[in-house]
Image (cartoon, rainbow, N blue to C red):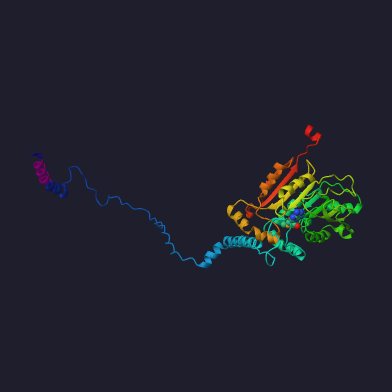
Amino acid sequence: MIAPTRGLVARVARPQWRLASTVSRAPRAGFKAPTAAVMPKITRPYKPKAPRASTPPPPPPPQAETLLDLWRATWLPLSGAALLAGALGFYIVGTLAASFKTCPCSGPCEHSTPTGRPPALTGDNAEQFDKELNMPEWWMGITKLRKRLAERANGHVLELAMGTGRNLEYYDWEPLNQRMGDDQAVTAAKGITSFTGLDISVDMLDVARKRLVKTVPPMASSAPIVRASNMTDHTGGQLSFLDDQLRLIHSDAHRPLPPPSTTSNPSSPAKYDTIIQTFGLCSVSDPVAVLTNLASAVRPGSGRIILLEHGKGWYGIVNGLLDKNADKHFEKYGCWWNRDIQELVEEAARKTPGLEVVKVERPNVLQMGTLVWVELRVADKSPSKSDS
Ligand SMILES: C[S@@+](CC[C@H](N)C(=O)[O-])C[C@H]1O[C@@H](n2cnc3c(N)ncnc32)[C@H](O)[C@@H]1O
């Protein structure tokens, strides 16, 4: 039995070991104990103790932030966000209010089908309509677009469905103003050398005439030539100023369009350099026919048709609202705001020989694609061009 024996030996040996370690031993022979006199004194030079690095005081207990502290720290971004939200709210409410205003007619409006004539915009209403548009157009970004469009109007210009002349003040009239100074026809690279404005409503044209007097200074001293309709040109009359270089024509956009005036400048081309139309396709009864008509009046090659229109946008929900309120809007403004402008323009290009779409843009993202900028041209099929 190995294990018990080993345990017994260990138990007996342990007290012996303890005894041996506590008994003082006798000095060994030959050993000399040092006396006190020879004992070296160990003295160390005094060194002041370096002060122990003091432990940092515990952080003060966190104080509750007051509202004032919070405001001080965040007033700038908060105010910015509040201003932005306010402006956006103002924009949306304003746009909706401007769009959904009720029909000014008392009782049912005269026309409920697209006749191309705004029934509510007659007499004083035309002037009122014009004033009401200032603010909404500004915040919808339309005023800016009118300026951009007017910059493109050069040479012999035709503006179709010009209404109260809301683009007039943005055109560059300098060539016409100069012309009156030296009594010479001016061929300028930029600006308007002759202007023809056309609309179906005499009331709208009358507001445009008053605006023109303010906008083109020489016009105030130019006696107008009044030309009544002769039935063959399908115009209901014409007012012409500045030697026929500035004309207002009462006519229908579906009828053949008058060429630029050649009265004082026989070298005038038979076609226009620029044709402008803003918010016209929504108002005429046959937009594709009107586009074909415009194509026949613009100079092939270099001439441009530039349109700023409104209609269906990017989102179904917006388009649904436009559809739902289309009747009411037509009654007020004589325009169908739920037309698909891009579709109409493409249809016109398919049906009209030579008509090409140069550009379709949907500016101003906040309008959700309902504003449409279109540029068109007519291919130059003259032999010299097709040969090259
Ligand atoms: C919505 S307003 C736009 C007026 C202007 N272009 C503007 O940007 O403010 C539509 C204009 O189209 C005119 N209009 C409607 N049908 C027309 C037609 N068949 N021929 C010529 N003008 C027409 C109306 O008289 C009205 O002045």
Task: Give the quadrant of ligand 1.
Answer: bottom right
Q: Position of residue 289 (x, y in %)?
A: 73, 48
Identify which residue, 272 or 69, lies in the foreground: 272
Task: Tell me if I can see residue 161 in this picture.
Answer: no
Q: Is residue 289 left or right of residue 173?
A: left
Identify which residue, 40 or 335, lies in the foreground: 335
Query: Of helix, strand and loop, which mostly describes the magenta segment?
Result: helix
Asked whether 130 falls inside the magenta stretch, the response is: no
Pick out the residue farthest to the right.
183
Magenta part of the protein: which range? Answer: 3-13
Name the quadrant of the N terminus: top left
Q: Is residue 270 left or right of residue 70?
A: right
Q: Residue at the spot x=66%, y=62% of the render? A: 98
Name the quadrant of the C terminus: top right
Q: Position of residue 97 (x, y in %)?
A: 64, 63
Q: Position of residue 57 (x, y in %)?
A: 42, 62
Q: Residue at the spot x=72%, y=46% of the render? A: 375
Identify which residue, 29 or 296, lies in the foreground: 296
Q: Is residue 93 left or right of residue 234?
A: left
Q: Position of residue 297 (x, y in %)?
A: 79, 46
Task: Tell me if I can see residue 67 in this picture.
Answer: yes
Image-quadrant location for residue 56? bottom left
In the image, residue 280 sits, relative to residue 386, either above or below, namely below
Q: Is residue 300 left or right of residue 138?
A: right
Pick out the residue farthest to the top.
387
Asked whether 6 falls inside the magenta stretch, the response is: yes
In the image, residue 272 sits, relative to residue 82, either above or below, namely above
